[in-house]
Image (cartoon, rainbow, N blue to C red):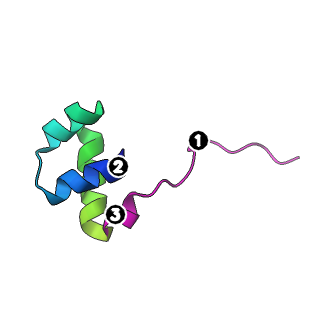
């Protein structure tokens, strides 16, 4: 999803339109765009599942 958005960022598609097409919040798209501007498409790569890790033991 984020990489698809990156293609639209390059074409200056409005954030609200991208959010609607991908069915995500506009806030999420703003965050992705900020990362894309700072580091290109590689900055949008998944960092894995979020949340707390399993306890050791």
Q: Which residue is mark 2?
A: 2
Q: Residue furthest right?
A: 57
Q: Are marks 1 and 2 in contact (CB under 8 Å)?
A: no
Question: Which residue bears the numbered disc 1?
Answer: 51
Label located before the other in sequence (1 or 2): 2
In the image, which residues are magenta? 40-57
Query: Mark 2 or mark 3, which has the lower sequence index?
Result: 2
Q: Residues within 10 Å of mark 3 (few under 14, many from 20)?
A: some
* Helix, strand or loop for disc 3: helix
The answer to whether marks 3 and 1 mark residues whose Cβ atoms lie closer than 8 Å is no
- Quadrant of the rendered structure where residue 15 is? top left
Q: Is residue 42 above or below residue 20?
A: below
With 35 as the anchor, is 11 left or right in this view? left
Residue 6 location, quadrant: bottom left
Q: Is residue 36 rendered to the left or right of residue 57? A: left
Residue 29 picture location, percent across and down: 26, 45
Q: Is residue 8 magenta?
A: no
Viewer-side label of 1, 2: 2
Q: Position of residue 5 (x, y in %)?
A: 27, 49
Q: Position of residue 45 (x, y in %)?
A: 44, 58
Residue at screen point 12% across, 56% down: 11
Determine which quarter of the picture holds residue 7: bottom left
- Residue for point 29% across, 30% down: 23
Q: Which residue is mark 3?
A: 41
| Residue depicted at x 25% and y 58% | 34
CA–CA distance in space, label 2 to label 3: 9 Å
Give the residue displayed 36% in from the left and 44% down from the top: 1
**The one of 27 and 9 positioned closer to us in this rendering:** 9
């Amino acid at each position: 999803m984020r990489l698809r958005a990156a293609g639209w960022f390059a074409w200056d598609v409005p954030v609200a339109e991208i959010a609607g097409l991908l069915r995500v919040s506009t806030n999420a798209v703003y965050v992705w765009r900020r990362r894309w501007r700072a580091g290109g498409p590689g900055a949008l790569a998944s960092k894995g599942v979020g949340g707390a890790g399993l306890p050791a033991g």
